Structure formats: C-alpha cells, structure tokens
Amino acid sequence: MSQSRLTESELREGIVLCKRKIKKLLDDAEILLFNNGDIIHALGLYTFAVEEYGKLVHMTTSQKKDDGNYYLDGDIFRGHPKKFELAFTNLPNECKFVFALIASGLDRARTVKFGNTRFSITGIGGVAKSIDFDIRMECFYVDWDKESRHWNFEPILETTELAIAIDTLKSLPNMS
C-alpha cells in the first residue's frame, strides 16, 4: 500500500481545503434542491460530499509518526471504497441512504430508505444498494446493464430527506 507523507502544516491545510470543498458541494446540492433543480443531480453532489467527508475523517484521525510527519493511506486520494467506508462509519443515520432498486422497464420500481425513513414504490424483486460510487454514476450517467438487459435508473428520493442529510452533515462538529 502506498502512503502519502504530509507535514503537520500540509495536513492542516488539507483539512481546511477538504472542509471547504464539502461545504461547497453541499451548498450546490441545496441550490438544486430548493430552486427547481434536479434532485438526482443534488444527490450526486451529495455523494461527492460524503466521499470527501471520508477523506476528512482519515486526515483528522491520522497520527503523527516519530519523524514528525503524517502518513496517509494513498488510496484516500484516488480510491472510492475506503472513503465511503470511513464516511459511513462516522456519519449519523440521517446522512446515510440505502436504496433497494427494482428494475422493470421504464417504470422501474424502487424503495428508498434514507436514514430511518422508507419510501416505497411497488415492484417485484430488487437489489439493496448504499450510497457509493455506483449510485453517483447512476445520478449522472445513462448506462446499459448487459447482464440484466436494462438501462440504469435514477434513484427516487424525497427533497426533505436529502435536505435533512445535507443540513446534518454541514452541522457535524468536525465540519466547523
């Protein structure tokens, strides 16, 4: 595993920049939510903020080594899974999504669980998904699943629930 060596001042600067980026992503998601923008694009921006929050957690929990430097997992800057895992381990339930996605042509039925609230649209069969890189791609791109022989679909969610998640993430103690 590769590591990135940072001095204390470099790490502090990275933490400030990361917080700033998270806040900008959340602000832009709110602009879409409250100004007739596309809620799915707002969700996509929110996934970027969640991923950056995972990076922030990694940086803020790093320990100084004997040589006075901080060594960060190299995957924290390029890979997605570790950042999402760190974010989900540290975020409150209000900031977490779980999607049960059910494909059935253009009228795909889905159940969305957001925090402790569940929204349902009737359908048959399904696959559970949490907020991750794949969900982000589904928010922004049209893609064909050759195995299921279906076009990808956009998640369905309520504006209020996404707004609560954004507000909760913005107000976390380590975001100030």
Image: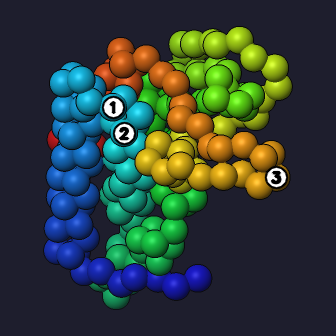
Q: Residues within 10 Å of mark 2 (few under 14, many from 20)?
A: some
- Residue 132 position, x and y percent, is 55, 47
**Compared to 151, does 69 lie above or below?**
below
| Residue under label 2 | 41
Q: Secondary structure at mark 2?
A: helix
Q: Tell me if residue 57 can be seen.
A: no
- State the mark number for residue 147: 3
Image quadrant of residue 165? top left
Q: Nearer the viewer, residue 150 or 133?
A: 150
Give the mark nearer the N terminus: 3 vs 2. Answer: 2
Mark 3 vs mark 1, CA separation in Å:
29 Å
The circle drawn on residue 86 is: none
The quadrant the N terminus occupies is bottom right
Alpha carbon separation for disc pair 1 and 2: 5 Å
Query: From the viewer's perspective, is the residue at label 3 or at label 2 nearer?
Result: 3
Which residue type does callout 2 highlight?
Answer: His
Q: Quadrant of the C terminus?
A: top left
Q: Which residue is mark 1?
A: 38
Looking at numbered disc 1 in the image, what kind of residue is underneath it? Asp
